[in-house]
Image: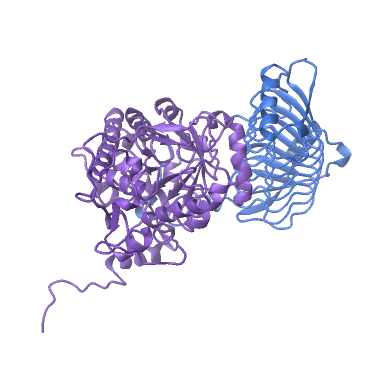
Chain colours: A purple, B blue
Amino acid sequence: MTTLKEPDTNEVLSQRIVEDIQVKAELGRYRIRGFSTFQRLVHFDDVMFVARNLTERNSENGTVETETILGTRFAERAIKISTPVYITGMSYGALSRTAKVALAKGAAKVGTATCTGDGGMLTEERRYSTKMIYQLNASRYGVTPQDLVKGDGIEIVVGQGAKPATGGLLMGQKVSAIIAEKRDLPAGIDQRSPTRHPEWLGPDDLGIFVETMRELTDWKVPIQIKIPACRVRDDVKLAAKTGADGIVIDGMQAGTGASSEVVLDHSGIPTLSAIATAREALKEIDLYKKVYLVVSGGIRNGVDAAKAIALGADAVAIGQAAMIALNCNREIPGVTDFDREVGVPAGYCTKCNTGKCPVGITTQDPELEKRLILDEAAVRVANFLDSMTTEMKVITRAVGKNNVHDLSPDDMVALNLEASIMTKLPMVGTQTVPSMTRW
Amino acid sequence: MALRKADQRVSISDSAGVVVDARKLTTREFNVRLHALLSQGKTRITITNPEARHNLGVGLLQGCRLEFEGSVGYYCLSYCDGIDATVKGNSGWGLGDNLMSGRIIVTRNVGSSTGASMRGGEIIVWGDAGARTGISMKGGTVIVAGDSGFLTGFMMQKGRIIVLGDVGSAAGDSMYEGIIYFGGKVKSLGADAKIEPVDRREQKEVVGILMSAGARLEDIPRSFKKIVSKKKLYHYDSLEPLERDRMVI
C-alpha cells in the first residue's frame, strides 16, 4: 500500500471552496471582501509588443511624448495631464483621509488627475489635486452643486467593473461619525447604496441628464460615463450617444473596498476583452478618438497601460496599484502584524471591507490611519506614477514610436487563442485572427 | 448640512421683474440668460413659453424668484440653492433634483423622481406626483396635495414627504431615517417599511407645515399616518470574525 506524501487536489472542491462552504454554513449569507476577483482571467500578460527590427527602422530620436488630453468633444476646458494614467475614483470612507490626500498630492506631483469616488468631495483632495474629476454615483452621498462645479471633469458612474449592477457597500466599522455625517446616514450602519441613479433610468434619460451636468458646469468641463465591462459593445454605443465627452470602461479585474464575492468573481468580462470591443463599437458609430476612452481594471504597471493604449484607450486609471504604492499589503517591521491583525500574511490581504487595514489606507480607525505617513505616501504614489510613465516610454521607443498615443494594435500579438479572439490581435506564430461574425 | 426652515425667505432685490420668452432661446441660451440676469441683480424673472423643455434653470445658486408660465420638462430647477420658483403647469422628471434650499411650487402634476436626492428646502406639488417621489432624499420636505406614485421615498435618508392623498406601491422601500406622512391609503409597503400612527404633536406639526405651504385647513386630512423604516436592514444579521469587532468613532 502506498502512502501519499501530499493530499490529492480536488479541482472542483478545492481547499478554498471547502473553507468557503464551511464559513457560509455559519453565516447564512454571501461573503464580502475587498480587492478584486480571484478568477484567473486573460489579462495583459497574454499579449505582447513586437518591435519591427529590420522591417522598419526605429527612430533614433529617444524622446517619447506622453501628454494626454481628454475631453475635446464638447467641453471648453479639456483635461490635460502629463501622462496617460490617473488615479481612479475611490471614496473617502472606503479610504482614509490620509490616503485620499496622499493620492492627491502624489498625482499633483507628476501632473495627473484624481477622481473623488463616492461620498462627495473631500475638501483637501480639491486643495491638493491639480486635476480632480468629480464622481457622481447613484448614492449621491455628499453631493452639492457648489462642489460639483469645482471639478475639472464629471464622471457619471453607471457601475464599476468589480461589482457590476450593484450599489456601493461600506460596512459599519467604516461608517464613523464623520463619514456618517458626510453621507447623511446613521453612524455605524452597514451602508448600502442604490444600484441605479435616482432620476434617470435608461440611456435616453441619461442623455438628458448629461445635458443637466453640462448646464450646471456651463459646458466648461468634460463629462465622462463609467461603465462596468459587461455588454460593452452596446453600452459603449449608448453611452457615446448620450453626448458624453468620454467613456471609462472598468474591467472585471477592477478592485473595490467591499463587495459580495458572488459579483466580484462571477460578473463582468476581462479588461483585455473590453478594450478592443469598446474601440470597435466607437468606430462603428464614427466616434472613435472623438469620444475618449479610459480603461481601468487591473492596470498594474506602465506596460499594461501601454498595451491598453495600443488596443484603443486614450488613458488608463489605476486604483489597486495606487493603493499598493501607498503601502497596501506591506509589512512594516515594528508597526504592522498582518497575521495577527487580519489573519493573513502581508501580500494576501483583501480585508478592505473590515476597516482593519494594518497600513491605514482602507480604515477610519485613527490609530491605524496614523501608520500611513502622508508625505512619504505621496512620494511613493508619485514615484509609482513616474515609473509607469518611464515604462510606457521604454516600450513605446522599443516599437519605434515617439508618442505613446501612436501605439496601435499593429504593434502587438497575442500569446494564446483566447487573447487573440478577445483582442483581435493575430496569435503569435500566425498572421491571422480567428474570425467572428459579431463581437 | 443643516435644514433651513421652509419659510425662510431669501433676500431678493426690489428691481422690477424681467420677462424671458423661452420659446426664442435654446436651452443653453436660456440658462445663460438666466445666469446673466441674476448676476446683474435682476432676481425676479417670469419665464413664458417654457413648453415643457428639459433642463431649464439648472444650477441657480443665488436667491431669485422665478415664475414659469407653463409646464417644464426633465430635471428643471435641479442643483439649485436658495431659489423661490413656481411652475404654473406640470413638471417632468427630476424636478428640484439635489435642491439645497429654497422653495419650488408646481401648480399641477409632477413626473417621476421629484425632489430626488434633495438636501433641503421644500417642493410643493398641488396635483399628483409620479413614481419615486423623494427618492434618495437627504433632507428637506416634499408636499404632494394629491396622490404619490410607486416607490415613493425609496432609499430616503432624511427629510419628510407629506402626501395628502394616497401613496402607491412599495412605499418607503429601504428607507433610512426619512418619514412619509400620508392622509389617504397606501397601496403597499416597500422592503423594511412600516406604518406608525402620528401623535397629536406631530399631527399639529404636519398641519402647520401644510398651512405654511399654503394649504387650506379644510383641505387637510384630519389625521395622518406615517411610514418609517423598521431598521432591520441597518446591519447584516451575521458577521465573520473580522467583521464582528465593530467600532464607531
Which quadrant: the C terminus of chain A? bottom left
Residue at horizontal 59 percent and vertical 30 percent from the top: A218
Numbered circles on residues, count: 0
Q: Is residue A314 left or right of residue B92?
A: left
- Is residue A145 placed above or below A392 in the rendered structure? above
Q: Please state the horizontal and vertical placement of residue B90, each as a whole percent of the image.
A: 79, 42
Q: Is residue A78 left or right of residue A37?
A: right
Q: Is residue A358 left or right of residue B26?
A: left
Q: Residue furthest right?
A: B218
- Is residue B187 placed above or below A212 in the rendered structure? below
Q: Please state the horizontal and vertical placement of residue B201, each as a whole percent of the image.
A: 74, 37
Closer to the camera, A356 or A120? A120
Closer to the camera, B148 or A110? A110
Instruction: Say if residue A111 shows up in the picture.
Output: yes
Q: Is residue B96 left or right of residue B237?
A: right
Q: Residue furthest bottom?
A: A1
Question: Splitting the image into 4 quarters, where does residue B21 fall?
Answer: top right
Q: Please state the horizontal and vertical placement of residue A298, each as a whole percent of the image.
A: 34, 50
Instruction: Say if residue A194 shows up in the picture.
Output: no
Question: Splitting the image into 4 quarters, where does residue B199 fall?
Answer: top right
Q: Please state the horizontal and vertical placement of residue B123, each as a whole percent of the image.
A: 72, 36
Which quadrant: the N terminus of chain A? bottom left
